[in-house]
Image (spheres, rainbow, N blue to C red):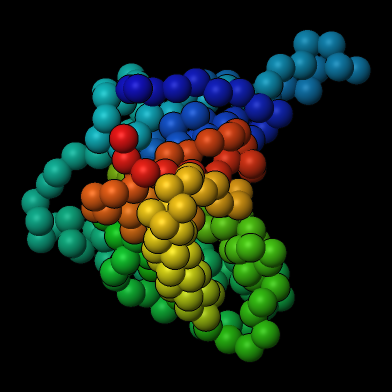
Amino acid sequence: MASVEASGKTVAEAIERALDELDATREDIEFEVLSEPKSGILGVGSSDARVRAWRIGEGDAPAGADAVVDGDSAAEGELIEDDAEMAAQMLDHLLELMGITADVSIRDAETPGDGLGMAKAVLDIEGDDLGLLIGRRGETLASLQYLLNLMVGRKLTEHATFTVDVEGYRRRRETQLNSLARRMADQVRRTRRPVTLEPMPPNERRIIHLTLAEDHEVETSSLGEGENRKVSISLKR
């Protein structure tokens, strides 16, 4: 599909619904806000937020939406570096507002868990007792990354997405997911029965899909909706 339209009580909720429809992560898409939510007066005249979203590189961007274009390679390299520095400063400021003392460093994305092929860079947060920033199943970290990219997107004229990691959490989680995917694929081959994994956020489902993408015996698909969306692994027909 070229693009989808989705609605929600907030713009963020509308974007999440669009991500579910596209089976994508925030880093995979561009979006345009079609209308902001309105509260109305005593509930009269209220309306939801509406967005239009499409995968990066698929279909034409809507009129008025930012388009990603190729430019001079040297100038583009300088832009990326400046963008990463700006994103790191914004993240520093967010952490300061949260009362968290930590260091932010910049590195290249190297694996799917880092956002390889989508993220301009990875912003690593290091410090003491940062479990609070990760949250249950990485939910707080995902929200922090989403907020940062929303802020960065308002400052830049070109699309740039950044992955935020805390104390190597994403790399450890990626290793766990790679191992889980291969174990479950072996189980499917042994029992000849499909396996459905627990609900996962889009970025984690993507890791499962990519881990088994070149497996000649099994295939993966996403099932369910919203927070209950899961990956199913089954034998190829």
Residue 88 location in percent, x, y? 44, 69
Residue 23 in view, yes or no: yes
In the rendered image, which quarter contains the C terminus? top left
Please identify the residue farthest to the top as the structure is shown: 45
Camera-nearest residue between 142 and 74: 142
Residue 58 location in percent, x, y? 27, 30
Camera-nearest residue between 119 and 151: 119
Q: Residue at x 46, y 53 (%)?
A: 191
Q: Residue at x 55, y 51 (%)?
A: 197
Q: In the image, is residue 162 above or below residue 24?
A: below
Residue 1 location in percent, x, y? 35, 22
Please identify the residue farthest to the bottom as the structure is shown: 128
Residue 163 in view, yes or no: no
Q: Residue at x 52, y 25 (%)?
A: 51
Camera-nearest residue between 83 and 223: 223
Q: In the image, is residue 178 above or below residue 234?
A: below
User: Count of labels shown?
Assistant: 0
Is residue 15 toward the left or the right of residue 98 in the image? left
Q: In the image, is residue 183 above or below residue 146?
A: below
In which quarter of the view is residue 62 placed?
top left
Q: Residue at x 43, y 48 (%)?
A: 192
